Image (cartoon, rainbow, N blue to C red):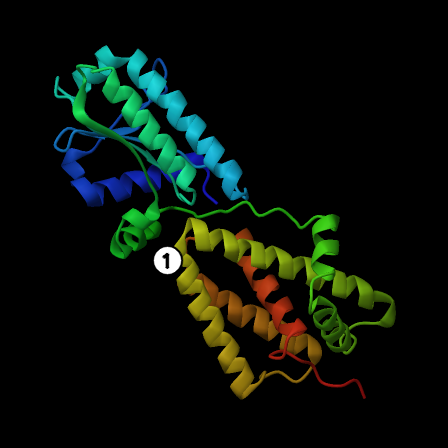
Amino acid sequence: MWNPDDWEIFALGLLNCRHGVLNVHKVPAKDQGDLGIDYYCNKDSVAYQCYAVEEPIGVAERAKKQKDKITRDLGKLQKNNVIVSKLFLGAPIKRWVLLSPLHDSKDVNIHCANKTTELRSKALPYLDTDFEVLIHDQAFFGADALTLNAAQLSLIKLSIPNPTNPQISSWEKEKGSQDLLSTARTKLAKRTTPQKLEDAVADATRYHLQGAALMSALRSQAPELHDNLATVIASRRRHLEFAGPTAVTASGILNDEIMNLKEAIKGAAPNLSPENVDQLVFGTVSEWIMQCPLDFPDVP
């Protein structure tokens, strides 16, 4: 999940890879507002507007927000056409692109097509006769560009809220969830008192759901980073399944796995925020407790 400022910085890096550093220009919005443009390239006569919605959000709602943004900022472009034309040195604009972390609805494509037809029909002198409105996301850029620019971000921080009670209840009703809870209860009984057992199971459930939500967000918002993390976690799981834990006591086993996994995740994603690292670590370890890889010695 991107906040608008981080996405704008990241997008600039992507555009530099696409057009060349000397060919991309920034339009600051603090001085007298923006023009419906964040970046532009005279060489290719293309204008870009960055937009990251607040996640998590559904496909339909994301599409609605993106369509509204397109409509709103194309209006700004037309209103400020004299200034915009000067930025492009009088050359007509060929493309206006909404640049978002994720594009997953054809409704936005249809909206772009409608806006393209609408603006072409106006025969505006500052727009090319083949002017086109587009939406691009990270999938339009190569893996090298994504990896390079992710590494240059000072910090990647995704806002993943704690699961709500209704979300937890809904998950508990899903097929297989009760088996997972039963397994967690059996294992956690070996390392906590009967009085604290249900609290420990509840914590594991929350951690598991939050970790899953984080990985889901990474899959859509930062696919390269998601794949790197998934590979590291799978490798650590295979190691645990094959060799077993190195510690002897329940607390030692748990602490070792938490620390080992944390180091592996930080190595794969050095710019991931400490909060997100913890969410991923505790979510993964909780999943392992609910499944087969991680267990504790029986209480004598």
Q: Position of residue 77 (x, y in %)?
A: 30, 18
Asked if one can make out residue 34 in the rendered structure from this viewpoint, the answer is: no
Mark 1 lies on residue = 224
The amino acid at mark 1 is: Glu
Query: In the rendered image, is residue 103 in sight?
Result: yes
Q: Nearer the viewer, residue 144 or 92?
A: 92
SS at circle 1: helix
Q: Percent position (x, y) of residue 206?
A: 68, 57
Q: Please indicate whether residue 103 sits to the left or right of residue 262 in the image.
A: left
In the image, is residue 70 above or below residue 267?
A: above
Tell whether 132 sits left or right of 169. Answer: left
Instruction: Determine crowd level at label 1: few under 14, some 14-19, many 20+ residues with C-alpha closer than 10 A.
Output: some
Nearer to us in this view, 73 or 50:
73
Q: Write the residue at 33% across / 25% down.
A: 115
Query: Horizontal placement of 204 versus 215: left or right?
Result: right
Task: Answer above or below: position of 121 versus 296.
Answer: above
Instruction: Give whichever of 168, 7 is nearer the camera.
Output: 168
Please tell me which residue is depicted at 40% across the width and 57% down the height of the picture: 225
